[in-house]
Image (spheres, rainbow, N blue to C red):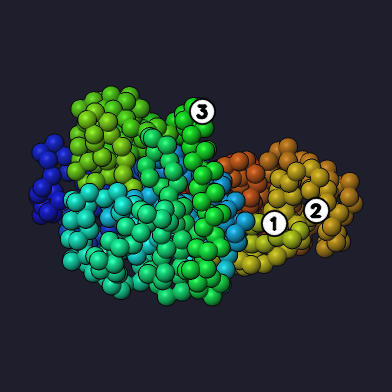
């Protein structure tokens, strides 16, 4: 038997131990920055090695981690847990657009936060690109007393919440428990109480460099209608642009107007259709016991599936959770008891809700990913499978720019570095990317290109190029043979975002002697399409509530 942790010792009798252990593994990985070896996981979680191995194997089957030899890494798919929370909250989907618009208008960063115990939790960030830029992400948690939204939320605290705050302050005065927060003492109770009283009277609150020197923020509450959790709208700036006082003088009226407009949207949405329900049931539910392997711990996978059941709807009853997951009532009940015990679910009477703590399961970390980082493991897998180099590229000013790549170690292999820019018209990547543009832009892209013969085979006549793009658009792939360089054959397919817009292309490049064109289409194309689908699945999960950079 593994040693009991304090959480397990205090756990209710019906709590599911493998679910608690699996979550402990996810938390350890999140706290360690996303990757740990199996033996480091064993040490940080104090679980038995065999337990860690089985939990990691199970989490790999559910797609929540990647196993690379002995390394365990959080995978983008894990964001579906946090997505379930954000979706059930409804605020991000409804307020994201006006928040982004406000950031644009003010040319300052804007964020949305909700209360989380004695802390605040970001549920949206509209960040401006600046040299001095903010690094808070969706899912990050900050101590209430060092933020602008904190005093606004604390105005509603009862005695026991102040007591919890005092206990945390006493145990961790510098806020060391908060990831990414520069540790230093926050204001004491008198100062925080005074700010809270002022916030209640004035309806706004300032953070004058309480997080870190230079950082200033102004927050107001969004006057949410009943049924929504409290939400604060902040504008965040730097003392090099505004002092805290100036921020209030100049931007408070605009911030208040934006908060009112947001409230209007929430009211309107109350009469509208409910949010769309969960995207789909976990993929492993369709797999056979044999596919899942002997290490698979069903109770862990099922417990995490219960979290995803909350996607799309507000509070759920036990019957609803059982219905949505297809789990037996008793199984769903024990999972809910476990998640409630660990603080991921809050239960009031017969109703269960997810809590913002769900975002501690890797969300801010994974929210910082980019398209190329997310694609890399998939490119590696394909490269190993077909024995050729595989790349990802985007359209950049009429050229294709390589953003990620997995190379093989053959003597004669195609060697094109990340960052390389090549003419779009003569490459398979470029043809797929141009084919993905709306027709008018597609034509403009061709017209703007300085088309010239790079080899005797390069298509240079406009009508030939136009026809090649039409074929690529229709078939969903492009094969280019010796048009960029003699002997170089390349096959590409598009990578599309949630809206179906082509945002990148993925290709396999090989020497033309390595396969016939037919073999290329028969053997390589289906695998390449599969790779693009995997990249897309990760991208679609990651970008549901987060803007994922395309580089
Ligand atoms: C932020 O959105 O990054 C932010 C908001 C309020 C603060 C500090 C930072 O007090």
- C-alpha span from label 2 to label 3: 41 Å
Q: Which element is circle 2 on?
A: helix
Please say if 415 is above or below 430: below
Tell me the residue at 60%/59% (across/down): 106
Q: Residue 354 at x, y = what percent?
A: 32, 40
Q: Which element is circle 3 on?
A: loop
Estimate how packed mark 3 is, as few (under 14), some (14 to 19) or many (20 or more) residues with alpha carbons within 10 Å: few
Left or right position of 17 against 117: left
- Asked whether 252 or 545 is in front, the reply is 252
Q: Residue 539 at x, y = what percent?
A: 52, 48
Q: Residue 531 at x, y = what percent?
A: 54, 47
Estimate how packed mark 1 is, as few (under 14), some (14 to 19) or many (20 or more) residues with alpha carbons within 10 Å: many
Residue at numbered disc 3: 272
Q: Residue 395 carries which label?
A: 1
- C-alpha span from label 3 to label 1: 38 Å
Query: The C terminus lies in which quarter of the figure?
Result: bottom right
- Asked whether 1 or 438 is in front, the reply is 438
Residue at numbered disc 2: 445
For residue 330, which quarter of the picture?
Answer: top left
Please report whichever mark, 3 or 1, sits nearer to the chain's N-terminal start: 3
- Asked whether 369 or 487 is in front, the reply is 369
Tell me the residue at 28%/27% (across/down): 317
Q: Which residue lies furthest to the front in this view?
A: 201
Please report whichever mark, 2 or 3, sits nearer to the chain's N-terminal start: 3
Q: Give the foreground label among 2 and 3.
A: 3
Please report whichever mark, 2 or 1, sits nearer to the chain's N-terminal start: 1
Q: Give the foreground label among 3 and 1.
A: 3
């Amino acid at each position: 038997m593994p040693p009991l942790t304090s959480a397990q010792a205090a756990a209710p009798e019906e709590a599911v131990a493998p679910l608690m252990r699996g979550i402990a593994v996810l938390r350890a990985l999140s706290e360690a920055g996303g990757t740990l070896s199996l033996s480091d996981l064993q040490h940080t979680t104090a679980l038995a090695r065999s337990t860690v191995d089985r939990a990691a194997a199970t989490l790999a089957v559910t797609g929540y981690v990647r196993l690379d030899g002995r390394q365990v890494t959080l995978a983008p798919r894990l964001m579906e847990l946090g997505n379930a929370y954000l979706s059930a909250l409804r605020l991000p989907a409804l307020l994201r657009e006006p928040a982004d618009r406000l950031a644009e208008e003010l040319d300052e960063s804007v964020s949305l936060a909700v209360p989380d115990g004695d802390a605040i939790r970001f549920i949206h960030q509209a960040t401006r690109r600046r040299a001095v830029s903010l690094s808070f992400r969706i899912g990050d948690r900050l101590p209430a007393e060092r933020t602008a939204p904190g005093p606004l939320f604390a105005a509603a605290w009862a005695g026991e919440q102040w007591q919890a705050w005092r206990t945390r302050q006493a145990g961790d005065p510098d806020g060391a428990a908060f990831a990414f927060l520069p540790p230093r003492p926050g204001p004491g109770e008198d100062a925080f109480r005074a700010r809270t009283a002022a916030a209640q009277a004035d309806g706004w609150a300032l953070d004058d460099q309480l997080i870190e020197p230079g950082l200033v923020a102004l927050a107001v509450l969004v006057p949410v209608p009943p049924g929504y959790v409290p939400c604060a709208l902040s504008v965040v700036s730097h003392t090099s642009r505004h002092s805290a006082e100036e921020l209030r003088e100049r931007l408070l009226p605009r911030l208040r107007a934006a908060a009112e407009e947001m409230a209007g949207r929430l009211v309107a949405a109350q009469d509208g259709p409910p949010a769309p329900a969960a995207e789909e049931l976990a993929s492993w539910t369709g797999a056979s016991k044999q596919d899942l392997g002997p290490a698979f711990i069903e109770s862990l996978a099922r417990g995490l599936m219960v979290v995803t059941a909350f996607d799309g709807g507000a509070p759920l009853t036990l019957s609803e959770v059982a219905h949505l997951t297809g789990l037996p009532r008793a199984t769903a009940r024990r999972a809910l008891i476990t998640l409630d015990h660990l603080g991921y679910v809050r239960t009031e009477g017969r109703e269960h809700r997810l809590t913002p703590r769900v975002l501690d399961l890797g969300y801010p970390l994974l929210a910082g990913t980019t398209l190329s980082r997310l694609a890399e493991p998939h490119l590696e897998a394909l490269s190993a499978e077909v024995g050729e180099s595989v790349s990802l590229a985007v359209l950049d000013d009429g050229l294709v720019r390589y953003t990620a790549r997995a190379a093989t170690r053959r003597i004669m292999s195609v060697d094109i570095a990340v960052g390389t820019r090549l003419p779009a018209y003569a490459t398979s990547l470029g043809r797929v990317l141009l084919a993905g543009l709306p027709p008018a832009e597609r034509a403009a892209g061709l017209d703007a290109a300085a088309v010239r013969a790079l080899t005797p085979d390069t298509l240079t006549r406009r009508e030939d190029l136009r026809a090649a793009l039409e074929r690529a658009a229709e078939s969903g792939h492009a094969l280019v043979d010796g048009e960029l360089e003699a002997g170089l054959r390349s096959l590409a397919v598009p990578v599309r975002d949630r809206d179906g817009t082509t945002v990148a292309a993925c290709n396999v490049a090989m020497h033309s002697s390595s396969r016939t064109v037919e073999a290329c289409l028969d053997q390589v194309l289906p695998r390449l399409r599969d790779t693009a689908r995997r990249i897309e699945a990760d991208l679609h999960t990651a970008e549901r509530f987060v803007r994922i950079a395309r580089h």
